[in-house]
Image (cartoon, rainbow, N blue to C red):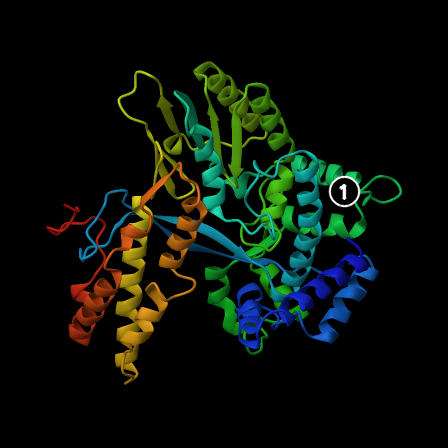
Amino acid sequence: MKTSDLDLYFRALDEKLIRLSPQHADEFIKLNFPNYKHIGKYVNPLNESSRAFFLSALQDDLKDYSFDPLLSFPIDQVKYSKQVLHPDCRCFRRSKVKLRPIKTCSHRDRILYSSWNHYLSSLHKKWLTQHNLNHAVSAYIPETGKFNAHYAKIAFDYIQGKEQYYAVALDVKSFFDKIPHVELKKNLITLLKGNKKLDVEGRLSKVDYRLLKSVTEYTFINLEDLQKVEQSLKSGNGMYFNRHRHNWDKLRKLFLIRSNKQEGIPQGLACSGVLSNIAMMEFDLSMNQACKKLDSMYIRYADDIFIVSESSDSLNRLSTHCRSLLDDLNLPIADNKTEEFVYSPNSNRPPTISYLGLECTGNEITVRKNGVNKFYERTRRFIFSYVLTCRRRDIKPSRKKIRAIFSHSGKNNYYAYLKRVHEVFENDNRYKLGGIKGVLKNHVEWLDKVFDRALAVPLSEYEKKYKKHNKCTCPLQRDS
């Protein structure tokens, strides 16, 4: 990446913001460059002096630029039940909680990673087109105008009208944490070589090499450890500490700065998605070619792999080939998430194929049950939290606001998502869609009921009455 590429990124950012209203432009910046607490102060990507700093740093090949350690902390990832639970059930619908490690970069580094993502994504997207892989690689591809339902439809389209088919859905375990550095670097060189972006000796440029090294051989600090010594560090508003030499010396003395050099890239960086795709380039190419030879189909959405064929023998060969390629990359398969689907002339009814949050039984499309349960649970939790916060601050809770956020009038909620899914399939007369928008039937009445219930609970009873349970135990556990 050169200064001209960084300048193109800033210009593309400006052009995007110009097309948005002031309110939406502000929301875009808050979403893509949030002002979270980290190392050093917040850096606004629209600030001219900040842009001049980064352009100067790239002009000097990042020679004097120092990447900050990432801050590492776990978040709860709730796994919801696959049962159809009644929306009025007051029990929590989670079956288990998984701790997912998250690592965040400083605001200064975020701008560099965002610009590198913009640069690499355009090259990778071009590579996909050249190798006819646009249908097969679907996650982290910018400006396609598509989302998960489009790619699920590609998978479901294959089986329509067929008298028999065999499919398998595989999931790569700890995908980002296991990405092989050697394969990532090799494929990155291949990508840049094909676009004549290497240096005169056919190597990565100094800038690309520094950026690659920063996301593979990265350093990080556990946030819990940092918070214990935060008061002894030189700091400022909105930051854990500044870049004063005193802070680095203290953190090193306490052995709080750790490093990763073996495998994996941090999940959550602006460039993580495109780097994961680059690491899988040869895998995608090999799988797609193998499927074409056997009149089969392959799709990969990040770590979710789907293979379908009309022949059981072909599927077995492709599944074996896929597992062999993943073994070569040291990418483990989550066997507990592997699903196989079989439909033959001897089958009584088509299997329910589940992929990317949707389910297809023959030609009937529905959403996954745990997705619906997730909506009900998160919505209820938000409403009770909102009402509690308002009452503590002597603010009247707004029923209208809850409806605006979660009902059919909202723009970016679960109901809006269901409408978008419906639109993907509605013009294709091969499909029946009764189970899409109908899953949230009478949802406004349910919102009002939960809102009234939250208002009726005394402040002192919130924690006791609505404490979390691992399993649903009330009489409304299942829909009738």
Instruction: Using the image, determine if residue 148 lies above or below residue 223.
Output: above
Residue 239 at what x, y percent from top left?
Answer: 55, 72
Residue 45 at what x, y percent from top left?
Answer: 66, 69
Of all residues shown, which one is farthest toward the right?
Answer: 200
Image quadrant assignment for residue 360:
top left
The residue type indicated by label 1 comes to Leu
Residue 195 at what x, y percent from top left?
Answer: 79, 42
Q: Is residue 278 or residue 220 the one in the foreground? A: 278
Identified at 47% across, 66% down, the residue is 227
Q: How many marks?
A: 1
Q: Is residue 203 left or right of residue 392?
A: right
Residue 33 at what x, y percent from top left?
Answer: 58, 66
- Residue 63: in sight, yes or no? no
Identified at 30% across, 72% down, the residue is 386
Identified at 36% across, 68% down, the residue is 405
Image quadrant assignment for residue 393:
bottom left
Q: Is residue 327 or residue 217 the one in the foreground? A: 327
Q: Is residue 5 left or right of residue 84?
A: right
To which residue does mark 1 refer? Answer: 192
Image quarter of the C terminus: top left
Q: Is residue 51 or residue 177 the one in the foreground? A: 51
Instruction: Using the image, determine if residue 287 lies above or below residue 92.
Output: above
Q: Is residue 40 left or right of residue 370?
A: right
Secondary structure category for the residue under label 1: helix
Of all residues shown, which one is farthest toward the bottom?
Answer: 394
Identified at 25% across, 51% down, the residue is 93
Image quadrant assignment for residue 263:
top right
Of all residues shown, which one is farthest toward the top?
Answer: 313
